[in-house]
Amino acid sequence: MGDTELSYYLPSRADGVNDMFLYIGLRAPRYLFTPRRVLATWALLLLRHPLLSSRVIPPPPNESPFHTDYSSTRLSYTAPASPAEVLRKAEDLLEFQRNVSRDQLFDRFLNGERVLGENRLSYLIVTESLSDAERECAEYSLLICSTHFSADGVSFHQFGNEFFTIIAGTEMGSMCTDADLEDLVRKEWRARWGPRATTVALPPPVEDRLPPVGNMLKKAVGRVDFLNTTREQIGGHALPRTTGMKRKEIVQAITFDEFTSRTILQKCKSQGVSFSNALFALCALAWSRTQLERGVELRTDLPIMMYSAINLRPYLLPSDSSYWMPALGFFNVILPSFLPHTPRAGEKTPWKAIRSTFWHRARSAKAQSTRVAKHPLLPSRAREMARQRSESAKAFAAEDDAKELGLAVGPRLPATSSSILQKPTAPSTALLGLSNLGNLDGIYIHKDYPSIQLHTLTSACRVRPGGLLLFGYTFAGKLTLNLAYDLNGFKDGIIEAWWKDLLGGCDELLVGKPAARL
C-alpha cells in the first residue's frame, strides 16, 4: 500500500471508519435490470478495475504492536482462472433486494455490522420497486459500496457512469442482449488473462504517479514549504461534541428543484464564485450566527477553518491503469469568525445585513481554493501530507493493537523533530469537512443511456463517533446538500440549529425567498 491507502486502511480495521457508499435512484425498463444482466455488467467492471475484487494482506504479527511494520500491509489480487470464475466472484459481491427503502439501506451500511472488510473491498446492492401503473418499468436503486483505501468520490461517479453505459448497451454501439454482455465478459477476461495477456493488475499507489520531486535540494524545499504551510493552518472553532454514546449516523439530503438550482448557480456566477465557494462562506457565517443565538461567546480572535478534498488526477503522470483508486489530497479554507454587525445576546444578525460580507468571504474561499490548486508545489505537498497522515495512522494503529492485547500504552511522542523544536502557537481545529463535488452531470453522460432516468444521488461514509461531513453537488440538473453526521456525537440541538440556519442562508442570500425543496 502507498501512504494514502495506508492512512485510510489502518483506521478502518476495527469498525469500517470511512467505508463509502454511493446511492443512485433511477427509473428504467425492467429488461435492462434483470439479475443476469446486472451480474454480467458487475463482472465486467470487476475485471476492468481489479481493486474492486482485491483483498488486504495485513502485516505479519509481532510480539509488540510497537514493533509491527504496518508499512508492509499489501493489497493482493488473484487473477480469475476463467470467465465462469469471474461471474462467481461477482455473484458473491452482489445482492438483490425488493421494496427496500433508501433509509433502510443507509442505516444498514452506516450503523449495522460492517458490510465490507479485508477480504471484501466492494459490494453492490440493487433494489427494485415495481410500478403498478407501468409494469414494464420499475424504480431501481444502486448502492455501490467500497472501502475508502481503494477508491474516492471521483472513482464512484466514474464507475456509476460506466455501469449505466454498459448495462444500457451503449458501449457496444447497439442494444445488446444478456448473452451479449456475458460474451463481453469472456472477451475482457481473454484480453486480460488469456495466453497472450500482459496486464499489470493493480494500479500503482497515487504517490508513485505524482511527478518526481527531483534532487535532494528540491525535496528539502518541498519539505520546508509543507511545514510552513502547515503552521499557517489556524482554526479555533469546533462543533461541541459529546462522548460515551453509541455512534448513530444519519443522512439528511436537501435537493432544490431545477428552477431554484439554476437561480442559485446563476447568482453565484454573477458574483464571480461557484456554489462550492459560497458553501464555505455559508457554513462559517451560519456557525457564527448560531453561536450568538445560543448565547455563547464567539471567539472572534480565531478564524474558522474547514477542510476539503482535492482531486489529484489532473496532476498524475499518464497511465493506462484503472481510475478506481484513491487519488485525493486535502486543503483548508480559513475564514473570519466575526460578524460585521453584532446583535445582542440571544439574537441573530439578519442575513440581509451581512450580504456583502457573505460574497466577500465566498470570494476569499475561491481565492484560497484556486491558490492551492494552481500552486507549483501541490504534488510535493500532497506527497508530504500523505506521508504525515500515514505516519499518524501507524502510530494510532500500534496504540489500538496494544490496547486490544491489554498492553500498557505510554504518551505519544511527536512525529517529527520540527514539532519538538517549534511548538504550534495557535490551534488548528477544523469546524467540519466539505466535499464539494461540483457538477456531476459532467461525469454522468445521461444521453448515452436515454432509457434510464437517473433522478437521485446520495453519498456518505461511516464517520467516526462525533464525525460530520457535508456534500454539495449538482446532479440531474438539481442542486443537493447532503449532511452525514453522528446523531449521538454532538450536544443536543446544535447540528439541527446550524443546519437550519445554513439552509435559511441559502434562501435569503442565494434564492431571495424561501425555496422549494424536494
Image (tube, rainbow, N blue to C red):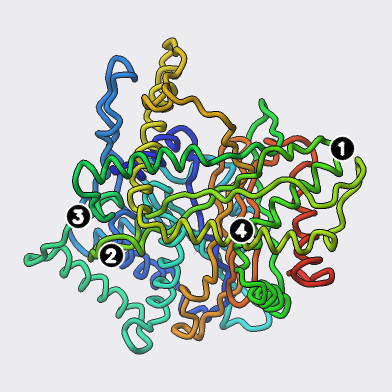
**Secondary-structure class at tag 4:** helix
Tag 3 or tag 1, which sits nearer the N-term?
A: 3
- The reply to whether callout 4 and callout 3 are in contact (CB within 8 Å) is no
The residues bearing labels 2 and 3 have C-alpha atoms spaced at a distance of 12 Å
Return the mark for residue 46.
none
Q: Amino acid at mark 4?
A: Ser
User: Mark 1 to mark 3: distance in Å?
Assistant: 61 Å
State the separation of the CA atoms marked 2 and 1: 56 Å
Task: Please give left or right for residue 327 compared with residue 229 in the image.
Answer: left
Residue at the spot of label 3: 79
Query: Quadrant where the N terminus lies?
Result: top left
Q: Which residue is mark 1?
A: 295
Of circles 2 and 1, the one toward us is: 1
**Amino acid identity at mark 3:** Ala
- Eye-nearest disc, 2 or 3: 2
**In the depicted view, which residue is nearer to us: 37 or 382?**
382
Q: Nearer the viewer, residue 450 or 80?
A: 450
Q: Is residue 421 left or right of residue 237?
A: left
**Closer-to-camera residue (152/248):** 152
Label 2 is placed on what type of residue?
A: Arg
